[in-house]
Image (cartoon, helix red, strand yellow):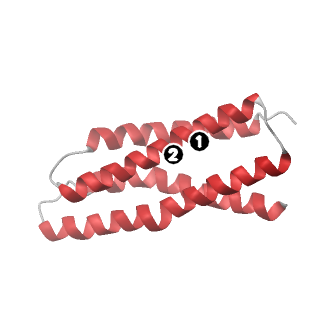
Amino acid sequence: MPLLKLLHFAALLCWCGSLLYLPALISAGTRSGDRLFYRDHAHLTRLVFTLISTPAALLAIGSGTALFLRDGTLAGWLIMKLTVVTAMALCHALCGVLVLRVERAPERSVTRQCLAIGVLVPLLIVITLWLVLAKPF
């Protein structure tokens, strides 16, 4: 089913793109002194997280699961790939925690956590891509 694979790739692109963007967006919400800016920025950040990133993550994980169940694949590379995807899902959840933290206390700095996620996510994406391309046929 090429459509299932296409759905998986499209959802994965949206999810990875939003995971690359969210830490910068979250961190930017703590930099202004204007209270109205905080409220609007927090609303935008929550919308990106809940309406773009989370549905894309669920769709990517669900379609990826359907792909390997359809093919009946269970190998060492798949276990490693799923471990890396789990780390990406944990980064996604941490972004959600940071969104809530910035909403509750906008003047509180979360720059270190955002920087850590911003460095870790590209690394996880590259590792996932390498594992997929190194897949034995």
What is the quadrant of residue 103 in the picture? bottom left
Work out whether 67 lies above or below 78. below
Residue at the image position 66 percent from the left and 61 percent from the top? 10
Where in the figure is residue 74, as x and y percent of width and height?
Answer: 79, 36
Work out whether 81 lies above or below 99. above
Identify which amino acid the numbered label 2 is placed on: Ala
- List the residue tagged with mark 2: 89
Locate the N terminus and report the quarter of the image it occupies: bottom right
- List the residue tagged with mark 1: 85
Where in the figure is residue 90, as x and y percent of width and height?
Answer: 47, 42
User: Between 26 and 51, which is closer to the camera in this rendering?
Assistant: 51
User: Between 136 and 72, which is closer to the camera in this rendering?
Assistant: 72
Identify which amino acid the numbered label 1 is placed on: Val
In three-dimensional space, the C-alpha distance between marks 2 and 1, rounded to whole angstroms, equals 6 Å
Is 51 on the left or on the right of 84, as rendered?
left
Disc 2: CA contacts within 10 A as few (<14), some (14-19) or many (>=20): some
Is 134 on the left or on the right of 13, as rendered?
right
Which element carries disc 1, helix, strand or loop? helix
- All told, the count of numbered labels is 2
Q: Residue furthest right?
A: 137
* Label 2 with label 1: CB-CB less than 8 Å: yes
Work out whether 21 lies above or below 123. below
Which element carries disc 2, helix, strand or loop? helix
Where in the figure is residue 96, as x and y percent of width and height?
Answer: 37, 53
Residue at the image position 66 percent from the left and 31 percent from the top? 80
Locate the C terminus and report the quarter of the image it occupies: top right
Disc 1: CA contacts within 10 A as few (<14), some (14-19) or many (>=20): some
Where in the figure is residue 31, as x and y percent of width and height?
Answer: 19, 54
What is the quadrant of residue 33 in the picture? bottom left
User: Between 72 and 40, which is closer to the camera in this rendering?
Assistant: 72
